[in-house]
Amino acid sequence: MIDNKISIKGDPVVDIYRGAIGHRATWTGLTYTKSKEAGKAEETEKIIREAIVETGKVHGTEIKSKCQDPESVACFAETFLTPNALKTFEVEFKAKTEDRVDLEFHHCPLLKAWQDLGFDDATCEKLCDMAMDGDRSIAKAMGFEFHLGDTIANGGKTCQMSYFKKGK
């Protein structure tokens, strides 16, 4: 059972961010589910994943250009995860070094939007994995590796994500 809790409430900026992210997730989720109803789930999933990968490349390139030290995973994390993003996703740093960043996300506004639409857990998990293609692509654009551990959409308490230099 998915438990996508929220502990940061009533922050106007966080509420705006969550609303915008949820709106984007609503579009993606409804595009996928309507395509699934039309018997075109596989084709649509492929297209959505390609679009998310491309979005990740764009964001990764932009983040890399803003990093004072693009070889530093810590610099990447500080550039990528702004203070508002940290609060929006309720992110906790488990480790942050020049070679590796381990993160736990305690809330996901994308998942909340899918839950609010009434999507079953399997659909939420599928959409989550599709969305994670963006993070995978951001890491690749930075020249880093990416590991996704447990996810809230998969029934975990948090989303566990790591960005790291190859071989670290």
Image (cartoon, rainbow, N blue to C red):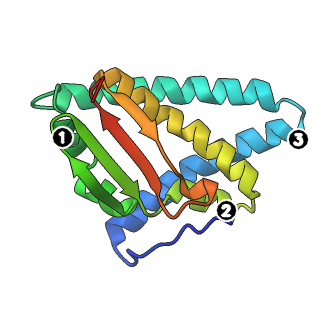
Residue 57 lies, in percent from the top left, at 40, 23
- How many angstroms separate mark 2 from mark 1 (CA)? 32 Å
Q: Quadrant of the C terminus?
A: top left
Q: Quadrant of the N terminus?
A: bottom right
From the image, tell me which residue sits under label 3.
37
- How many angstroms separate mark 2 from mark 3 (CA)? 18 Å
The foreground one among 22 and 43 is 43
Amino acid type, mark 1: Ala
In the image, taking residue 48 as reference, residue 32 lies left or right, namely right
- How many angstroms separate mark 3 from mark 1 (CA)? 43 Å
Residue 118 visible in the shown view: yes
Callout 3: helix, strand or loop? helix
Which residue does the image show at 45% across and 60% down from the upper left? Answer: 18
**Residue 115, relative to residue 23: is it above or below?**
below
In the image, taking residue 127 as reference, residue 62 lies left or right, namely left
Amino acid type, mark 3: Glu
From the image, tell me which residue sits under label 1.
74
Q: Residue furthest front?
A: 167
Residue 68 lies, in percent from the top left, at 9, 31
From the image, tell me which residue sits under label 2.
115
Callout 1: helix, strand or loop? helix
